[in-house]
Amino acid sequence: MNSLVKVLLSSAIPAAALLAAPSAHADTVAYLVNVHVRPGYNFPNAEAAIGYGNTVCDRVAAQMSYAELVDQVKADFHTTDYYQAGYLINQAVNELCPAQIWQLRQSAAGYTGS
């Protein structure tokens, strides 16, 4: 009986730790700081910046390919700079919708740019 209790307790503690693990949360302040520090986006206000970032998150969640996502951001900001588009995509997903990071990584795998 004693050994059964030890076995149950030894498996219950790691399970409780997994259940109590923090979930990914959006960090809008970090996103705003990062997209306002880097020139080229020129959002008129914080709401516009957050709205655009949430649009990026929605596109990733809808499984838009990374190539299409980059092209869309480049078109929206009238630029040919991949790094400007990639930076904004990265900031949006990492800070506003971290639960979508895996989806973005899967979509970007093998992307070589254009």
Image: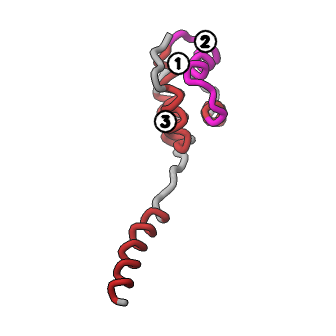
Q: Is residue 28 visible?
A: no
- Which amino acid is tagged 1? Gly
Q: Residue 27: x and y, percent?
A: 52, 45
Q: Kindly indicate whether the residue at mark 2 contacts the one at mark 1 (C-beta within 8 angstroms).
A: no
Compared with 63, 11 (above or below) is: below
Q: Is residue 11 above or below residue 91?
A: below
Disc 3 from disc 1: Cα separation:
14 Å
Residue 58 placement: quadrant: top right
How packed mark 1 is, by other alpha carbons closer than 10 Å (few <14, some 14-19, many 20 or more), is few
User: What type is the residue that disc 2 sits on?
Assistant: His
Given residues 99 and 26, the one toward you in this image is: 99
- Per the image, the residue denoted by label 2 is 78
The residue identified by callout 1 is 40
Question: What residue did someone put label 3 on?
Answer: 33
Left or right, 100 with reference to 4: right
* Residue positioned 45% across, 15% down in the render: 112
Local packing at callout 2 (Cα closer than 10 Å; few below 14, some 14-19, many 20+) is few
Viewer-closest of 20 and 92: 20
Q: Quadrant of the N terminus?
A: bottom left
Q: Provide the residue span drawn in magenta.
A: 61-81
Which of the two labelled residues, at mark 3 and mark 1, occupies the earlier sequence position? 3
Dot 1 falls on a residue whose secondary structure is loop
- Residue 57 screen position, x and y as percent: 61, 35
